Image: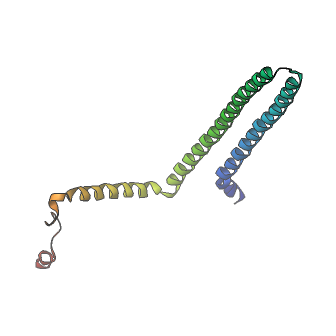
Amino acid sequence: MIKDMTEKMKPITTMAEVNKSTAEQLISIQTEYMTDMFNAGVAQMKALSEVKEPKAAFELQIKYFKDLEARLNNVAEKDMATLAAAKEQFMDLIEKSVSEMTEVYGLDNVTKFMQTSQEKLEEVTKSFSPEMIGKKPPSTAKTASQKSAH
């Protein structure tokens, strides 16, 4: 019974592992980013304290902000790549679980029934064109009087 329960819970534990791994990666990226930003800020303050000309300080600030933008873009790309990889793992896991469920519980028959029903509904809907409004739709079923005659 425990083995069966463990097997049924495997997709959930796999999802938890993916979540944990993704969180660890994102935390690592953000920690590295914050450390880098702190060090860049300290270096910028040191460089600004040594500058005598306002124009040179202004140019240093422009360079610093351009560098800051590049770093932010780099971190955002890393974060998005990490999240996209996690999403892909989730989608694969969900697809696998759904396909196994349909095999186990016979849901493929229900799906076929639903598709057939949808197709028939579309056929009937198409037969009711604007020209057909006010006219009797073609009927293939016998009327009540025809049934009672037999």
Structure colour scheme? rainbow
- Side of 2 relative to 88 (left or right): right
Does 72 sit above or below residue 94? above
> Which residue lies at the image location 74% right of the left edge and 38% below the top edge?
25
User: Which quadrant, please, contains the N terminus?
Assistant: bottom right
User: Which quadrant, please, contains the C terminus?
Assistant: bottom left
- From the top left corner, tell me how far across and down residue 46 is, in percent: 88, 26
- Side of 79 relative to 46 (left or right): left
Front residue of 135/4: it is: 135
Query: In this figure, what is the number of numbered marks?
Result: 0
> Which residue lies at the image location 50% right of the left edge and 53% below the top edge?
102
Front residue of 41/109: it is: 41
Does 70 sit above or below residue 149? above
Front residue of 11/121: it is: 121
> Which residue lies at the image location 67% right of the left edge and 48% below the top edge?
15
> Which residue lies at the image location 59% right of the left edge and 40% below the top edge?
88
- Side of 139 relative to 26 (left or right): left
User: Residue 21 is drawn in which quadrant?
Assistant: top right
User: Residue 8 is drawn in which quadrant?
Assistant: bottom right
- From the top left corner, tell me how far across and down residue 109 is, in percent: 42, 56
User: Residue 61 is drawn in which quadrant?
Assistant: top right
